[in-house]
Image (spheres, grey):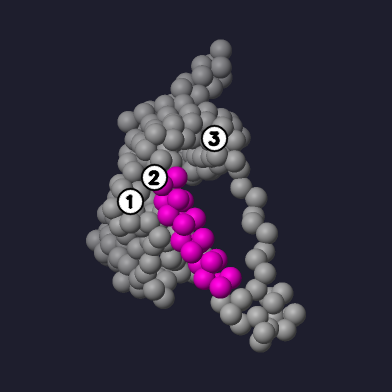
């Protein structure tokens, strides 16, 4: 129970700081790119809506009331307003995500029986970066708004399978000594990419290619900062809390 409390407390503290760090980095270098891409997306949507409206006018005499109703647009989904509200919701999402990932890193630290520390935490953070960002991004790179994509469920399934196989493959390569297990671990790393990530029927984006490439670079850097911060902080808090608990038990 003491170890569980230590993991949860460390995850909350590290997740709070790492989530805020990610929010700041995103605000500086990712959000401006998203805002530019949304301008292109809205312009493309306006052109598409105008074309649909013109088509409706030209063919109005052939439409029944029921068919006309089918072409009505559904109301836009709610989204936070630009500015402070959007930043606050982004920060809340980042912190929640960071706490969840922190629990995974804490579980790894505990299972390996290490004392923790920021150096050990950095290694676990690098592993998390490889598992949850680098490996999935090889098949599904970060995309700016307005980019064509495969069905969401297919992408989520491939992303999850890739993360699980990458985690398993790295674990076998690093923590086992049997060459057969290491070979199996290497195979796990490449299987998702041999299968291939789900792709859209046609590759298209409302934003220019240069903007899409800048978004990939910015997101890659932001996630690297996030995972290193989360791993280092998780290891640091995990060790400090262990020291405090040990001192209390001996007092």
Dot placed on the residue nearer the N-terminal end, 3 or 2: 2
Residue 6 located left or right of residue 111: right
Write down the residue under mark 3: 83
Task: Say which element carries label 2.
Answer: helix
Compared to residue 101, the image places residue 7 above or below, namely: above
Q: Residue at x 38, y 28 (%)?
A: 117
Estimate the x, y position of residue 22 in percent, counting from the top left. Answer: 44, 36
Q: CA distance from mark 2 to mark 1?
A: 7 Å
Which quadrant of the rendered structure holds the C terminus?
top right
- Residue 47 on the magenta span: yes
Question: Is residue 161 visible in the rendered structure shown here?
Answer: no
Residue 11 or 155: which is nearer the viewer?
155
Task: Say which element carries label 3.
Answer: loop
Dot placed on the residue nearer the N-terminal end, 1 or 3: 3
Q: Quadrant of residue 80?
A: top right
Query: What label does residue 33 carry, if any?
Result: 2
Estimate the x, y position of residue 41 in percent, counting from the top left. Answer: 46, 56
Write down the residue under mark 1: 211
Q: CA distance from mark 3 to mark 2?
A: 15 Å
Q: Residue at x 69, y 77 (%)?
A: 68
Compared to residue 249, the image places residue 44 above or below, namely: below
Q: Residue at x 41, y 47 (%)?
A: 36
Magenta range is 35-54
Neighbours of disc 3 within 10 Å: few (<14), some (14-19), many (20+) = few
Are the residues tagged 2 and 1 within 8 Å (C-beta)? yes
- Residue 134 on the magenta span: no
Q: Residue furthest top?
A: 251
Estimate the x, y position of residue 165 in percent, counting from the top left. Answer: 39, 61
Q: Residue at x 38, y 67 (%)?
A: 204
């Amino acid at each position: 129970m003491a170890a569980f409390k230590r993991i949860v407390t460390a995850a909350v503290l590290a997740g709070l700081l790492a989530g805020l760090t990610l929010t700041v980095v995103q605000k500086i270098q990712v959000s401006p790119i998203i805002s530019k891409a949304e301008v292109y997306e809205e312009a493309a949507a306006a052109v598409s809506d105008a074309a649909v409206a013109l088509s409706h006018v030209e063919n109005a005499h052939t439409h029944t009331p029921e068919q006309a109703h089918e072409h009505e647009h559904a109301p836009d989904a709610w989204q936070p307003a630009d500015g402070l509200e959007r930043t606050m919701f982004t920060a809340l999402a980042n912190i929640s995500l960071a706490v969840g990932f922190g629990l995974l890193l804490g579980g790894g630290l505990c299972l390996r029986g290490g004392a923790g520390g920021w150096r050990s935490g950095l290694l676990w953070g690098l592993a998390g970066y490889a598992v949850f960002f680098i490996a999935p991004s090889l098949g599904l790179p970060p995309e700016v708004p307005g980019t064509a994509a495969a069905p969401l469920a297919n992408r989520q399934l491939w992303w999850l399978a890739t993360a699980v196989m990458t985690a398993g493959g790295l674990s076998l390569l690093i923590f086992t000594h049997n060459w057969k297990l290491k070979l199996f671990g290497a195979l796990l790393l490449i299987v998702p990419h041999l299968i291939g990530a789900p792709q859209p029927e046609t590759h298209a984006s409302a934003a220019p290619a240069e903007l899409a490439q800048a978004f990939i670079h910015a997101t890659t850097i932001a996630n690297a900062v996030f995972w290193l911060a989360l791993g280092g902080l998780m290891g640091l808090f995990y060790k400090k809390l262990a020291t405090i608990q040990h001192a209390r038990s001996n007092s």
